[in-house]
Image (cartoon, rainbow, N blue to C red):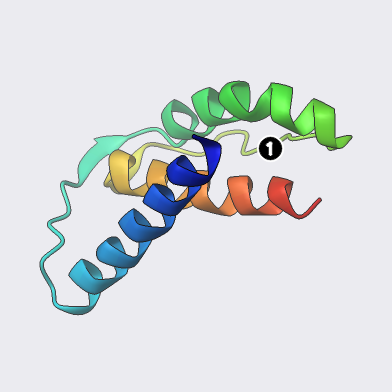
Amino acid sequence: RRSCSQMNERLESLLEVARLETGKVRLAPRHARLDEVVEPLLRAFAPRAERAGVELRWSAPGLPPFDFDPARLAQALENLVGNALKFA
C-alpha cells in the first residue's frame, strides 16, 4: 500500500511538472501572510522531523503580507521539506 502511495505521489509530481511546462497551471494569488502557509506545514511535518532527528524552524519577523498563491507555495514547500526529511 505504501509503495502504491509513493508511486501515486511521483506520478502526480510528474503531471504537475507537465502542467507547469505547458502553461496549464493556474495560479490564484491573494494577499496573504507567509506564516499562514509555513506554520501549518511545520506542524504537519514535526513528527516526521522528530523521528529523523531534524529540527524544523523558521523566522521572518515583521514580514508583511504580500500577493502569492498559498496553495501552490504550500505544495512546493511540502515537496521540499518532504524530500529533505526523506534523505535526512
Identify residue type, mark 1.
Trp
Name the residue located 44 percent from the left edge and 33 percent from the top edge.
37
Residue 61: percent from left, percent from top: 62, 34
Q: Is residue 44 left or right of residue 66?
A: right
Of the pair 55 and 50, the residue shown nearer to us:
50
Label 1: state its secondary structure: loop
Tally of numbered discs: 1
Q: Is residue 19 left or right of residue 2?
A: left
Q: Is residue 63 left or right of residue 71?
A: right
Residue 9: percent from left, percent from top: 41, 49
Up the image or down, 21 lies above or below 47; here it is below
Q: Is residue 57 left or right of residue 31?
A: right
Q: Decide: few, some or many residues near mark 1? Use Cα within 10 Å; few <14, some 14-19, many ≥20.
A: few
Residue reaching furthest to the bottom: 21
Residue reaching furthest to the front: 1
Residue reaching furthest to the right: 53
Quadrant in which residue 16 is drawn: bottom left
Of the pair 8 and 60, the residue shown nearer to us:
8
Name the residue located 51 percent from the left edge and 51 percent from the top edge.
79
Residue 76: percent from left, percent from top: 44, 52
Quadrant in which residue 51 is drawn: top right
Quadrant in which residue 36 is drawn: top left
Name the residue located 81 percent from the left edge and 27 percent from the top edge.
50
Circle 1 residue: 58
